[in-house]
Image: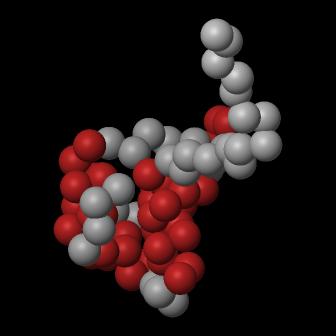
Amino acid sequence: MHSQTNLNMPKVETQTPEELIVQHLENNGQKLTWLAEKIGCTTGHLHSVLKGVDFTKRELTEENRKKINEALGTDY
């Protein structure tokens, strides 16, 4: 017996913690400026972490991820 893969199954898109954080902020009407102040970094740095692309992208450190989750009451 051969097992068949259901080709009609929808693909589940996995979002990065950065994408989830941005989506949470947008859904709750919160600003990057507010979050940057809460975690103690500049808005520019936070923008590079969450929305940066290619050369402007900065790493979301574990320390900042924890601070963001604490500020938002989330677990991304």
Colouring of the image: secondary structure
**Image location (x, y in percent) of residue 50:** 52, 56
Residue nearer the viewer, 8 or 17: 8
Q: Which residue lies furthest to the top in this view?
A: 1
Q: Could you tell me which residue is drawn at 32 percent across and 42 percent down? A: 61
* Picture layout, residue 64 above or below residue 33: above
Q: Is residue 5 above or below residue 62?
A: above
The residue lying toward the viewer, choosing from 9 and 23, is 9
Q: In this view, does 55 lie above or below 47?
A: above
Percent coordinates x, y for residue 22 in the rendering = 52, 67
* Residue farthest toward the front in the current orientation of the protein: 1
How many numbered markers are drawn?
0
Nearer to me, 11 or 56:
11
Most distant residue in the bottom direction: 29
Judge whether residue 42 can be spotted in this image: yes
Image position of 12 (left or right of 8): left
**Would you say 35 lies left or right of 44 here?**
left
- The answer to whether one can see residue 39 in this image is no
Residue depicted at 44% across the width and 39% down the height: 59
Q: In the rendered image, which quarter contains the C terminus?
A: bottom left
Residue occupying image coordinates x 53% and y 82% = 27
Residue located at (51% from left, 89% from top): 29
Percent coordinates x, y for residue 23 in the rendering = 54, 70
Across and down, in percent, residue 32 comes to: 48, 74
User: Which quadrant would the N terminus be assigned to in this image?
Assistant: top right
